[in-house]
Amino acid sequence: MIKNILSISLLVVVLFAAGCIGGKSVESSYLRVGSNAELKTVCEEVRPDLPAVAVKRFTSLPALDRETVILANGPVLTPDYRWSWEGTPAEILDIKTGPALSCMKNYEVVAPYRPGVERALILSGVVMSFEVQRSEGNIFKGAVRYSLWDGSGKRLLARKLIEASVPVKSLTGRAIANAAGTALESILAQTAIWIDGYSEEANP
């Protein structure tokens, strides 16, 4: 009897050590999207004479509301615990959007959104994709659905889905991070062009 209890205890210890009970069996490497060097190129001068665009914090569905990198096979999304982002995709966009929109010609950007700040427009966004799509040959796909509101936040002025797809050279952490950085840069560049060219008079 005692021998059986000792055997079971030893088995439990082995399973815990192997990661089969509780926790992940491998330790994640954290992937950074973009680099700090890009922050040196942003327009830091505040232009109070321009109308302001206030950017609300981004949201996403629960499957993307996690740091773990997602590998997708068509519509099936699987977390890969070998790699994690520094934050959730929505949090990454929260950090990156302000600097990316700071060089617009026709609008100043306020990010994140602060109640009480004078603004002409309010931008909100939902992260629709932020994963490596394996069914198409290892392509990183990012997509954000935007809504553009008037300054009161009560009237919807425009909406737009902005996407980017970038090949992942190899299924390694560095290659995934590089592809994600390129895709996000493209999404935010398209976003800046869309907002900077928006005119309420031209889009009643």
Image: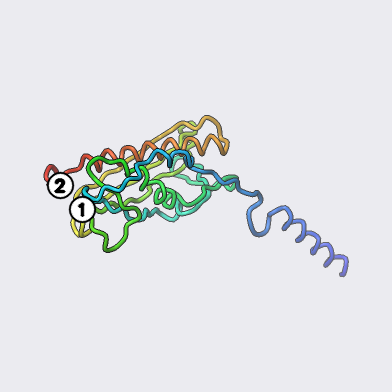
| Mark closer to the observer (1, 2) | 1
The image's colour scheme reads rainbow
Mark sitting earlier along the chain (1/2): 1
Residue drawn at x 44%, y 56% as measured from the top left: 62
Name the quadrant containing residue 130.
top left
Q: Secondary structure at mark 2?
A: loop
Q: Which mark is residue 39?
A: none
Q: Where's residue 21, x and y in %?
A: 67, 58
Q: Quadrant of the N terminus?
A: bottom right
Q: Where's residue 70, x and y in %?
A: 50, 45
Residue 91 is left or right of residue 112, and the answer is: right
The amino acid on which the numbered mark 1 sits, given as a three-letter code, is Ala
Q: Secondary structure at mark 1?
A: loop
Classify 17 as above or below 30. Answer: below
The residue furthest bottom is 1
Residue 187 is left or right of residue 73, and the answer is: left
Residue indicated by mark 2? 200
Q: Where's residue 40, x and y in %?
A: 43, 40
Classify 55 as above or below 136. Answer: below
Residue drawn at x 18%, y 56% as measured from the top left: 155
Name the quadrant containing residue 22.
bottom right
Q: Which mark is residue 120?
A: 1
In this rendered view, identify the residue nearer to me: 85 or 119: 119
Residue drawn at x 34%, y 53% as measured from the top left: 111
The amino acid on which the numbered mark 2 sits, given as a three-letter code, is Glu
| Distance between mark 1 and mark 2 Cα atoms | 10 Å
Q: Are marks 1 and 2 in contact (CB under 8 Å)?
A: no
